[in-house]
Amino acid sequence: MHILASDARSSDVAIGEAVGLSSNAAARRRRLLEGHGVIERYTAQFDLDRLGFGILVLVQMELVSQSDDALDRFEAAIQKCSAVSKCWFVSGDVDFLALVHVPSLHDFDETYRQELSSLPNVARIRSSFVLRSVIDRPTALRVLESAGRP
């Protein structure tokens, strides 16, 4: 799991060699993890800065109500916001935290005016611009390390 968390493109041969198994045994274990839903998907991680989406914004949104209808309407609407790559319903002072990638401050202004500010049931929006990344490790790798799993 550590090897796949670090490099999902690792071959069964390479995994087997690293952990002292045959490639067939490594493949069997990987398929078991996939079959049990432990491995959900394999993805590529892109350098968004090089692709022209170097502005990362954390957007906190507080709703006027947390009724089922208000939550459902908000969640359906934010899924249509093209600049939002992730959104979580959270506890604490705000209701939702969204991750927004845009090419420029001007583009964020447009996204804010045309998409975010018109989301239903939003009482307050606060935005924080990411200045630099301090830690950016695969989440699965961090979880495995804290659990003491090889």
Image (cartoon, helix red, strand yellow):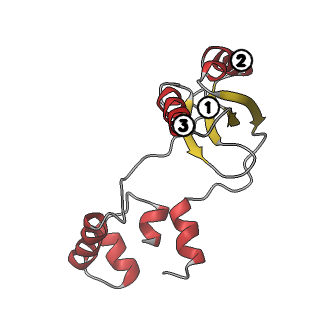
Query: How many marks are shown on the rendered structure?
Result: 3
Report which residue position mark 1 lands on: 101
Which dot marks residue 115? none
What amino acid is labelled 2 in the image? Answer: Asp
Which residue is at a point 40% across and 59% down the rendered structure image? Answer: 8
User: Nearer the N terminus, badge 3 or badge 2?
Assistant: 3
Q: Nearer the viewer, residue 1 or 129?
A: 129
Task: Indicate the position of residue 84 as horizontal and vertical percent values.
Answer: 56, 32
Which residue is at a point 66% across and 32% down the rendered structure image? Answer: 54
User: Nearer the N terminus, badge 1 or badge 2?
Assistant: 1
Report which residue position mark 2 lands on: 109
- Alpha carbon separation for disc pair 1 and 2: 12 Å
Q: Secondary structure at mark 1?
A: strand
Q: Residue furthest bottom?
A: 20
Mark 3, Cα crowd under 10 Å, few <14 / some 14-19 / many 20+, is some
Between marks 3 and 2 in the image, the one whose residue lies nearer the viewer = 3
Quadrant into which the N terminus falls: bottom left
Between marks 3 and 1 in the image, the one whose residue lies nearer the viewer = 3
